[in-house]
Amino acid sequence: MNELDILKVIHNNLTRTDLLGDDCACLSDIVNQHSLYVTHDTLVEDVHFSLDTISPYQLGVKAVSVNVSDLCAALAFPKYISISLSMPADISDEFVSEFYRGINDACIRFGCCVCGGDLTRCEKIVISICAIGQKSCNTKVGRDCANEGDVVVLCGYAGASAIGLMELKEDGAKRNIYTNAHLVPKTAFEKIKLLSDLSMPMLCAMDTSDGLADAVFKISLASNKVLKIDGDKIPVPENFKERCEHFNVSEMDMKLFGGEDFALLLTLSSKFVEKLKGEGFCVIGEVGKSSKNPVSSVVFGDGEDVLLTESRIKECTFNHFGSRTSLRGENVK
């Protein structure tokens, strides 16, 4: 396929194409309202995904979802996405069509649209998306907003995606809650309005794309606070222990270091927690005192106390520039 052919396929699979065609898209309809939020994420073949385990359609959905997840952590509603897609010269029109069909369906679900992008040739598929969102509340949101006495809340599962990748490697045709968590991850998109409507003065938030432990550590570091997590309260899907035993992996490692779950980790004042009951938010800990060297911890019922130090995070979580180059979900000790 040449570039013009690819562009035709793209246009045929997107519901809204009026912003495409020029080198720049004008987004003036949202500039003069609430603050804009911009995020950028890249998915690389054989690093973040394998075509042996994910379809082009699912890849399109996932590519949008991982960016929306970052916007959710800012309480920002997605508005536009720009896609840079690099592909081998012999890519099929079916791949492009199915990929953009997934992109389009995800955009419809999240209420955003494609406003542009770029096409280049590459030996492997590389998807780089810039997402632009808009916040509709005045809540201050950031990793540095955790306060002593706040409760720590998780919206979504931990460890599901990592187990899902193992399920797919064992049987690529298998479909269950775990494989779905890896192939078409859920985000906290449906919860943004609920959190916005609480009119909180401040909220600490981060998604768990690189693992729950990574998010806990980074919030602790940015806020200069100690986070104390109850490992037994971390939400996981049914039969989690059984699946961990099947793959001979540690439940603790999967919960803390599995990655790619795209759940939403929050710290907020306890007075707001009651309003979140029954909405998929699970209290998993509390924020402790300030510390010059904040070390968060996770305590499990068997008495194991996991200290989330910088060295532990470096050892156990995925690092793009480390020696391990396989898929995120496999990078678990």
Image (cartoon, rainbow, N blue to C red):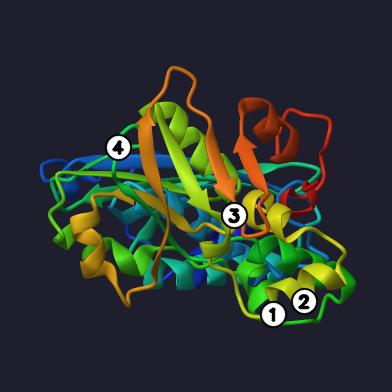
Q: 4 left or right of 193?
A: right
Q: What residue does disc 1 label?
A: 239
Q: Local crowd at mark 3 within 10 Å, few (<14), some, or many (≥20)? A: few
Dot 4 lies on which element? loop
Question: x and y percent of residue 205 in the render?
Answer: 36, 46
- The residue where tag 3 is placed is 4
Whether residue 168 can be seen here: no
Residue at image mark 4: 148
Query: Which numbered disc flags the more N-terminal residue, 1 or 3?
Result: 3
Residue at image point 78% right, 62% down: 51
Q: CA distance from mark 2 to mark 3?
A: 50 Å
- Mark nearer the viewer, 1 or 3: 1
CB of mark 2 within 8 Å of CB of mark 4? Answer: no
Inspect the image, locate mark 2, and give the three-letter code of the amino acid beneath it.
Answer: Glu
The residues tagged by marks 2 and 4 sit, at their Cα atoms, a distance apart of 36 Å
Query: Alpha-carbon distance for marks 2 and 1?
Result: 5 Å
Q: Given this view, does label 4 or label 3 mark the residue nearer the observer?
A: 4
In percent of width and height, residue 241 lies at 73, 72
Left or right: where does residue 43 sit relative to residue 155? right
The reply to whether the C-beta atoms of the residues labelled 2 and 1 are less than 8 Å apart is yes
Looking at the image, which residue is at 78% across and 81% down?
174
Q: Residue at x 83, y 66 (%)?
A: 52
Q: Nearer the viewer, residue 168 or 332?
A: 332
Between the residue at mark 4 and the residue at mark 3, the CA separation in whole angstroms equals 56 Å
Secondary element at image label 1? loop
The numbered mark at residue 242 is 2
Kindly identify the amino acid type of the residue bearing the numbered disc 3: Leu
Res. 119 image quadrant: top right
